[in-house]
Amino acid sequence: MKYALVLAIGLFVTRTAMACSCANTEDVKSAFKCSSAYFLGLVVEGNERSNTTAKIRVVEGFKGVDSGSIVTVDAGGSCGTTLVTGGLYVIQASLYDGALRTGMCTQTKEAHAAGKTLYRLRRYAWWWRLPFSGHGCRRA
């Protein structure tokens, strides 16, 4: 009986974890090309309580948003991303139904863990501004 209970709990936990897994993760370059917005932002109002929207001050805009602006980001419900008030994040977001959205399957991460990503984003942002850079999004 004891083992049956452990097995049942194990199956429940595994099923829950699988429900929020990401099937295909993109590299930073593809994510940059295909996203609507990519920026470094300071969370003004986090979503740690509501697990939905967060207000973010754009510290450095790489694509789609201007530095200094404040944007609202839908961080995605039960399989979303928690954005803690006062935290600094690199955020990849896409525009859906007029709202910026991010989630666990994007390149969104805390800034302290994004050294190489920030370096690449600064390079891509510079290239993106050139008129001949080829802005096509190609997903596999």
Image (cartoon, grey):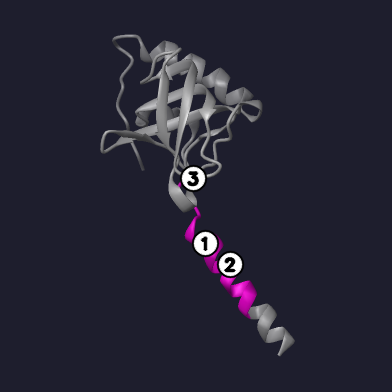
What is the count of numbered marks? Answer: 3
Q: Is residue 107 above or below residue 15?
A: above
**Dot 2: element:** helix
Please give the residue where the numbered disc 2 appears in the rendered image. 14
Quadrant where the C terminus sits is top left
Give me the disc on residue 50. 3
For the residue carrying disc 1, how many other residues have a C-alpha within 10 Å: few (<14), some (14-19), or many (20+)? few
Which of labels 1 and 3 is toward the front? 3
Which is nearer the eye, 76 or 62? 76
Which is nearer the eye, 129 or 79? 79
Q: Is residue 58 above or below residue 23?
A: above
**Residue 127 position by quadrant:** top left
The type of residue carrying mark 2 is: Thr
The type of residue carrying mark 1 is: Met
Q: Earlier in the sequence, mark 3 or mark 2?
A: 2
Residues at marks 2 and 1, CA–CA distance in whole angstroms: 6 Å
- Residue 53 forms part of the magenta stretch: no
Q: Pinpoint residue 22: horizontal percent, then vertical percent.
A: 48, 51
Q: Report whether residue 117 is seen.
A: yes
**Dot 3: element:** loop
Which residue is situated farthest in the bottom direction here? Answer: 1
For the residue carrying disc 2, how many other residues have a C-alpha within 10 Å: few (<14), some (14-19), or many (20+)? few
The residue at 69%/78% (across/down) is 6
Specify whether 68 is left or right of 83. left
Q: Is residue 99 above or below residue 116?
A: below
Specify whether 82 is left or right of 74. right
Please give the residue where the numbered disc 1 appears in the rendered image. 18
**Dot 1: element:** helix
Determine the main secondary structure of the stretch shown in magenta: helix
Q: Pinpoint residue 89: horizontal percent, then vertical percent.
A: 56, 28
